[in-house]
Image (tube, rainbow, N blue to C red):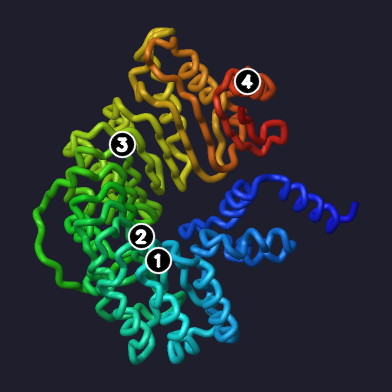
Amino acid sequence: MSYSRYETSLGSRLLLLPTEIIAEIFKNACSVDFDTLSQRKDNLTTPLTLGAVCKPWRDIVWPFSTLWSTIVLLASYERCNTQLDILDLWLTRSGRFPLSVYFSLIPLSNADWETDPPLAMLEKIMEHCERWKHIDMCIIDDPECKFVKLLEKIKGRVPLLRKGHLRQFENATVPRAQLDMFEIAPLLRSFCISILYLEDITLPWTQLTSFRARISEDECVQVLFRCPNLVDCTLFAIFSGPDQHFPSFPSIFTMKHLRSLKITNTDGNIVGNILQHIRCPALRELRPGSTISSLWGSIHLLFRPTDESINRSECSLEVLGMDTHRLHRSIFPILQRLRTLKSLTLRSQNSAGHDCFFGDLTGKPDISPGDPPTFLPELTEVRYATPDSVLDFSIVLEVLRTRWDIPPLGVPRLERFYLEGTFRFDNSHTLYVSKLVLVEGFKDLARQGMRISIPTEDTMDTYLAA
């Protein structure tokens, strides 16, 4: 059977299902996660894609307004008029459903967009701003600020908006204009800012429960202070910004609702300066990251404030992820005090220190055989990542067996163990334990139900997973 006939056969069999089920399948196929969209812009399934298969599919897709309520618009300078016609048709077919809109530009030539921004497209989208539920939009810094001035007209006209994202256009100048179009949005709860200046943006800060941003260190503390009701916050790729004028705030303030805080891909000094200002009694997930620092003092500028922040908050932390240049011994006293921790992720650019970590993870010699561990007693998941390195797998196997064989007396087992990177067997420590014996030990744990992923350069043990 040819491929085209095979596709037709599949399409025909799908039509045997009730129309409602087919519609739900199509809806799932067309779903889009804007947060990961940049990784798969060329592989999107759209209503137009489905409608091109056959007439019966078109008869289902064309009137199904929900499918047309998600709009991914990558404006092309050469195809603006054609795209505008398609956009008009798309919006008509979306009926009265709330809209999720992703609006970006194909960066063929920034000069073209900055001198001639796609105002007609923006106007067409803005005609339906009362239906916006989720908007993800780049901001163009054209000389006369036509783009931003036009966008200001939606102020007070987004009653359904729940989630927003404003970002700088790729490689363009960061626009300096007052961005207050989302100041009046009664349902807005989640917002993301990428490389824009905080003092230029006005949001209903006290409404927000989720916030992500790529902003400067001073701006990070300001955001945390302005958003007392945050539940989830991610601050990434923090850069040094110009001097900005912010109102003063207390040296330490409480964020009583914050449950998840991630500060990643930045310097340990910056992470420490942010953590020293906050108290978070409800915090359950903390992921501070420092991938730049390599000096002893800078390492302590990450670990020490992390420990102090946890102690100050008196929280029952359940998830901890730390990205650092080097795993230092000073992290282990911090871990020793985290009696409620369930998931631990450690990522290090340097392989030094992992033997100490795995040695502590066994819980020995503090415990007798059969007793629950005293080191991270609630731990059920471990992720450990480091570059190409040598690892004593006999210690790793001992850790997993010790954590798996804990008697089921209310003490959880270590259920998931993942190594990330490429690891080599340390022959100096495994002279009396062959690789085959170690691999069989890991496979036995996987057969019993533990989820294990251990990449090595040995072909007989690429991945082990239950």
Identify residue for label 1: 135
Task: Name the spot of residue 73 as percent of width and height, x first.
Answer: 52, 72
Q: Which mark is residue 330?
A: 3
Badge nearest the viewer, 1 or 3: 1
Measuring 43% from the left and 80% from the top, which residue is drawn there? 122
Identify residue for label 2: 163
Badge nearest the viewer, 4 or 3: 4
Q: Earlier in the sequence, mark 3 or mark 2?
A: 2
How many C-alpha atoms fall within 10 Å of the one at disc 3: few (<14), some, or many (≥20)? few
Badge nearest the viewer, 4 or 2: 2
Position above or below: 456 against 28: above
Q: CA distance from mark 2 to mark 1?
A: 7 Å
Q: Mark 1: which amino acid?
A: Ile
Q: CA distance from mark 4 to mark 3?
A: 36 Å
How many C-alpha atoms fall within 10 Å of the one at disc 2: few (<14), some, or many (≥20)? many
Q: Mark 4: which amino acid?
A: Arg
Say which quadrant the C terminus sits in: top right
Q: CA distance from mark 4 to mark 2?
A: 43 Å
Measuring 25% from the left and 59% from the top, which residue is drawn there? 220
- Marks 3 and 4: in contact by CB < 8 Å? no
Identify residue for label 4: 447
Q: CA distance from mark 1 to mark 3?
A: 44 Å
Q: Earlier in the sequence, mark 4 or mark 1?
A: 1
Q: Quadrant of residue 82?
A: bottom right
